[in-house]
Every structure is written in structure tokens, then in C-alpha cells.
Amino acid sequence: MSTDEPRQRPRGLRGMLHRLTASDQELESEELRRDSERAGCVCADTVGRGDLVNVTGRLRTVVYTPRTNLPTLEADLYDGTDLITLVFLGRRHINGIEPGRGVHVRGRVALRDGRKVIFNPYYELEAAA
């Protein structure tokens, strides 16, 4: 299967067996990838430096990093394929930006220490569960 083809879920007995034997993390990753495809977003593992992207996923960690000249709020977004760190410059807290929250972001990808980041992304929070 090429990377351009949509990922198919196993069906029938094979699908049931997969759901019974897969780890919670594998099932969560598959669900996030499906949600991303339905939303028309790109997968985080396919983006590179300089790309303007729409990505949707779930926030894994949110950390406030006090700096002497510019406070920074950083959140790791996982879409089922890879992590992208969202960096909100000059912010100590943003209501709704919390671990476990679903979010849709748009911005330009940069690389920092070999990791994908988006600085001050446009974001939309999914409704809290």
C-alpha cells in the first residue's frame, strides 16, 4: 500500500481480533488518524519545515516555560502519526489548552532541535467531552 492511499480499517472477524489484541495506544492512534483524514488535515509525519499545514489531534502535554525575557506555553499535539509542538510566545496560560483536549491548528512548520514546531498557531478547540 502506498502512503497516498487512505489507511483501511480491518473489517469483520479480522477487525474484531485486531481490536481485542491491539494496545490502547494503537487504537487511539488509529482513531486520531481517522479523525484527521475526515477533517481533511495532513498527517504530522508527512509535513516538513516551511510547510503551511492544517493538523488536528489531541494535546498530550502542556508546559509553561518561564524565560527571562519571554514566557512560553508549549503543547505537544499528537495526531496518531507524529508529534508537533505548538509554541505560544508570550503566554503563561490559555483557557482550554490542556492535556487530553482535541484541537485543530493551522500554521507554518519550523524545526527546533530536530523537532517539528508551529509558533503561535491559529487554533480551534474541540468541544470538551
Image: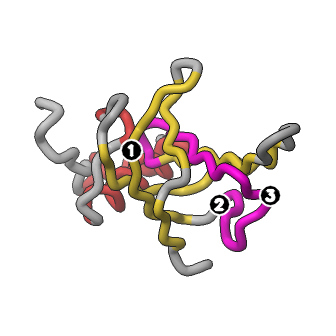
Q: Of the residues under marks 3 and 2, which one precedes in the sequence?
A: 3
Residue at x 66%, y 49% (from the top left corner): 89
Amino acid under label 2?
Answer: Gly
Q: Which disc number belongs to residue 92?
A: 3
Q: With respect to residue 93, does 47 lie above or below?
A: above
Q: Secondary structure at mark 3?
A: loop
Amino acid under label 3?
Answer: Arg
| Percent x, y of residue 98 | 70, 62
Q: Which residues are magenta?
A: 79-99
Amino acid under label 1?
Answer: Arg
Residue at the farthest top position: 114
> Which residue position holds label 2?
100
Q: Residues within 10 Å of mark 3 (few under 14, many from 20)?
A: some
Q: Residues within 10 Å of mark 2 (few under 14, many from 20)?
A: some
Q: Which disc number belongs to residue 108?
A: 1
In this view, the residue in front, 63 or 68, is: 68
In this view, the residue in front, 46 or 8, is: 46
Residue at the farthest front position: 69
| Percent x, y of residue 104 | 44, 63
Q: Secondary structure at mark 2?
A: loop
